Image: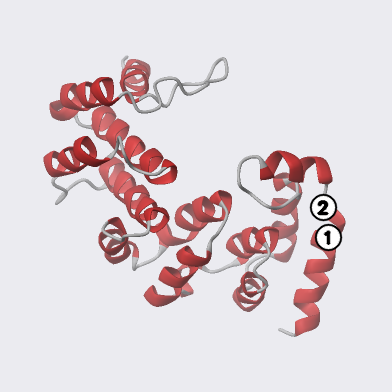
């Protein structure tokens, strides 16, 4: 890889910049103006290029970081690299993609889940909770779901937004996947009222845990 390669990609990203998209994204905390469909098309053309991905990430540009996530080789990152990257993620979209597209595929995911969940930085902690939610759904063996509900019950109401959202997702997932904990999960959601008034578009499921749990369970019934 040469600097020119990164420069060429950055120049192409600049041509994709749309002020209207930037305005919408910035209202959600994401400082970029590139249509994600076009970004994915560019990533498909570039294919997997780990060195290029590293160079794009190092630019610090949000659109470049998103592209880096799509072009990287998730299992090539070391534990310390991923820890640094989640702290550098900045925008919510970069943070979300990094956790879902890279960390979840990493052999270090479980070690990072445990470490991040207890991190004093609420954004880092939210990554740990996202990984816990993944385990609740796909590999719950070894998780203490009662203890998780205890923490959610005690801490979710006063948690910062992104951490609160991640804990709420975990609460809903426990209720959806685990019948024996469903009543308690719904009860916690009803008492804490987290995201109860969240504006939900038509035909979308509310993120309010009692509604979310009830609706997803209903859909799974024969």
Name the residue carrying label 2.
17
75 left or right of 47?
left
Up-down relation of residue 193 to residue 83 (above or below):
above
Q: Residue furthest bottom?
A: 2
Q: How is the image coloured?
A: secondary structure
Quarter of the image that includes the C terminus: top left
Label 1 close to label 2 by CB (< 8 Å): yes
Up-down relation of residue 59 to residue 179 (above or below):
below
70 left or right of 100?
right
Q: Nearer the viewer, residue 217 or 21?
A: 21
Q: Nearer the viewer, residue 121 or 129?
A: 121
92 left or right of 109?
right
Q: Residue furthest front?
A: 158
Residue 104: x, y in percent? 40, 57
Q: Residue furthest right?
A: 15
Up-down relation of residue 189 to residue 35 (above or below):
above
7 left or right of 194?
right
What residue is shown at x 42% (from left), y 27% (from top)?
207
Q: Please tell me how crowded label 1 is: few (under 14), some (14-19), or many (20+) other residues with Cα within 10 Å.
A: few
Total residue callouts: 2
Q: Nearer the viewer, residue 55 or 164?
A: 164
Quarter of the image that includes the N terminus: bottom right
Name the residue carrying label 1.
14
Q: Quadrant of residue 140?
A: top left
Up-down relation of residue 40 to residue 45 (above or below):
above
Residue 209: x, y in percent? 33, 25
């Amino acid at each position: 890889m040469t600097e020119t390669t990164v420069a060429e990609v950055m120049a192409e990203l600049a041509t994709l910049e749309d002020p209207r998209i930037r305005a919408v994204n910035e209202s959600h905390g994401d400082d970029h103006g590139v249509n994600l469909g076009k970004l994915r098309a560019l990533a498909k053309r570039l294919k997997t290029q780990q060195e290029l991905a590293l160079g794009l990430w190092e630019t610090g540009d949000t659109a470049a970081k998103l592209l880096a996530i799509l072009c990287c080789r998730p299992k090539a990152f070391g534990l310390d690299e991923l820890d640094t990257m989640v702290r550098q993620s900045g925008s919510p979209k970069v943070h979300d993609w990094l956790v879902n597209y890279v960390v979840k595929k990493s052999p270090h995911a479980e070690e990072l889940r445990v470490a991040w969940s207890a991190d004093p930085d609420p954004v880092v902690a939210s990554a740990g909770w996202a990984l816990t939610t993944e385990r609740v759904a796909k590999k719950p063996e070894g998780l203490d779901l009662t203890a998780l509900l205890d923490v959610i019950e005690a801490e979710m109401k006063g948690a910062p937004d992104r951490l609160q959202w991640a804990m709420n997702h975990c609460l809903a997932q426990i209720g959806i996947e685990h019948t024996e904990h469903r009543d308690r999960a719904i009860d916690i959601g009803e008492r804490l009222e987290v995201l109860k008034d969240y504006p939900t578009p038509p035909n979308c499921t509310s993120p309010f845990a009692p509604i979310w749990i009830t609706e997803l369970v209903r859909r799974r019934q024969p």
